[in-house]
Image (cartoon, grey):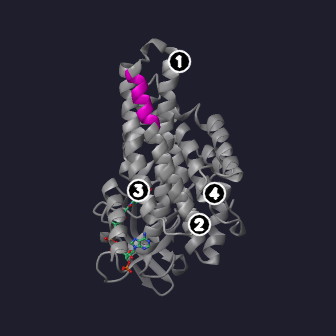
């Protein structure tokens, strides 16, 4: 057993770390205040080979491992978590297109996602009435010959205003719940498609989260993505990988919080006593445990072994630990922590949603328990 990532993975981590320190860290607080990310930065990120890291080389991607991907997202998130979530969701979209897409779909979308021509890809599963119970979605798609008509509304969609492609789930059959759901690729210029309301959020404020409206949105049937009626499985498989990304994002935010506390004590050494040492020791232990769970899930995915439950454990544990770490950091800085003179208040706001999106902690625990129950059978 080895407890170290390899030199290729370290090279990706370093590439992400230098991109993050040069292009993200100096601006993250301003972007948070302005509530927007420059599209040029996202394009530069893709051009630096940091979007769609796991897309295989034979499809024009960097062909890196999931372990490398997890390390890269952690580095980006430590500098700017709004950028990290944009890249993570886009990478989930790119990887799913690589896995499920037809040769024509790969040809049409992957080069744009990988080159940064599209600043992002977007994942449109949630709806106003279906979040955790994703199988109860109501958006409908009617396939009429060569045409498909989509009607419905999606909500909580990351990167909606600038995404070049949307993976959209819609009901095509009469099956109950998750049955009868199919997946489609929608482009922003498709007639009847509209980006709706932008949410006012407590955290990740530079990453836009919007609703999407489909009003007889017309696409051609070659935009059907994967097998008809099997769309729910596509969503679950994508989210298994996506949850490693969110766990890594939370870990990066947690590391930034720990670093901020250490920097604070360099300036205010008299504030660092035995109590503070003990709290920092706890934060660092939680960070280390979370990192091991993430790397294990990522390694299992790379080894093509079952990883769904381990990704769920990594996501639930890391995001909850990161929330605790950010809260501790805020407490340790006292009143200073509550001002925007220090990054901790932003980190505290940014980390909150990580226990919620891409499946709440309770959803992760459902995934974990079901895997144990099926092993016990
Ligand atoms: N891989 C492949 N197939 C899977 C699977 C997996 N990991 N998990 C389930 N399936 C399959 C099942 O085998 C089953 O297939 P059959 O119909 O052929 O039998 C089917 O999917 C339905 O499975 P379940 O009965 O387990 O489904 P469920 O309705 O009980 O739901 C759930 C389970 C885990 C709660 C699921 O609904 C879920 O993950 N909910 C959370 C959704 C979520 O994470 N949304 C986040 C959206 S993205 C986002 O946050 C925005 C963003 O941009 C960041």
Secondary element under disc 4, as helix, strand or loop, is loop
Q: Position of residue 14 (x, y in %)?
A: 67, 43
Report, in whole angstroms, how far the alpha carbon at label 1 lies from the one at label 2.
42 Å
Report, in whole angstroms, how far the alpha carbon at label 2 lies from the one at label 4.
16 Å
Discs 1, 2 touching: Cβ within 8 Å: no
Classify mark 2: residues with Cα within 10 Å, few (<14), some (14-19) or many (20+). few
Q: Residue at x 30, y 75 (%)?
A: 177
Task: Report the front residue among 96 and 266.
Answer: 266
> Which SS does the magenta portion mostly show?
helix
Q: Is residue 250 magenta?
A: no
Q: Horizontally, is 87 left or right of 60 in the view?
A: left
Residue 35 is at least partly visible in this image: no
Residue identifier under label 4:
53
Residue identifier under label 1:
266
Classify mark 4: residues with Cα within 10 Å, few (<14), some (14-19) or many (20+). many
| Mark 3 / mark 1, whichever is N-terminal | 1
Q: Position of residue 93 (x, y in %)?
A: 54, 63
Residue identifier under label 3:
313
């Amino acid at each position: 057993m080895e407890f170290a990532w390899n030199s290729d993975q370290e090279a990706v981590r370093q590439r992400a770390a230098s991109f993050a320190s040069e292009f993200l860290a100096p601006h993250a607080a301003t972007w948070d205040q302005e509530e927007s990310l420059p599209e040029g930065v996202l394009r530069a990120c893709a051009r630096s080979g940091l979007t769609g890291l796991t897309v295989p080389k034979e499809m024009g991607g960097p062909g890196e491992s999931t372990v490398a991907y997890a390390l890269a997202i952690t580095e980006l998130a430590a500098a700017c978590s709004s950028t990290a979530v944009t890249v993570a969701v886009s990478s989930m979209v790119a990887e799913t297109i690589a896995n499920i897409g037809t040769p024509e779909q790969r040809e049409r979308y992957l080069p744009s996602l990988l080159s940064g021509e599209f600043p992002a890809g977007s994942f449109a599963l949630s709806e106003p009435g279906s979040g955790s119970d994703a199988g109860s979605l109501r958006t409908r798609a009617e396939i009429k010959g060569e045409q498909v008509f989509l009607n419905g509304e999606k909500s909580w969609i990351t990167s909606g205003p600038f995404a070049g492609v949307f993976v959209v789930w819609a009901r095509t059959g009469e099956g109950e719940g998750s049955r009868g759901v199919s997946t489609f690729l929608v482009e922003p210029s498709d007639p009847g498609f509209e980006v709706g309301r932008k949410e006012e959020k407590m955290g990740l404020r530079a990453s836009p989260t919007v609703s999407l409206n489909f009003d007889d949105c017309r696409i051609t049937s070659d935009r059907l993505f994967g097998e008809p009626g099997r769309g729910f499985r596509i969503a679950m498989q994508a989210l298994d990988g996506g949850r490693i990304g969110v766990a890594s994002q939370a870990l990066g935010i947690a590391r930034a919080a720990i670093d901020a506390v250490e920097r604070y004590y360099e300036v205010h050494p008299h504030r660092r006593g035995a109590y503070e040492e003990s709290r920092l020791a706890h934060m660092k232990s939680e960070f280390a445990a979370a990192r091991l769970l993430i790397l294990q899930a990522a390694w299992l995915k790379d080894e093509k072994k079952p990883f769904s439950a381990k990704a769920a454990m990594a996501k639930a544990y890391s995001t909850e630990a990161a929330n605790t770490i950010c809260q501790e950091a805020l407490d340790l800085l006292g009143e200073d922590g509550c001002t925007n003179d220090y990054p901790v208040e932003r980190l505290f706001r940014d980390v909150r949603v990580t226990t919620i999106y891409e499946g709440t902690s309770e959803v992760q625990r459902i995934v974990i328990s079901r895997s144990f129950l099926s092993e016990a059978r």
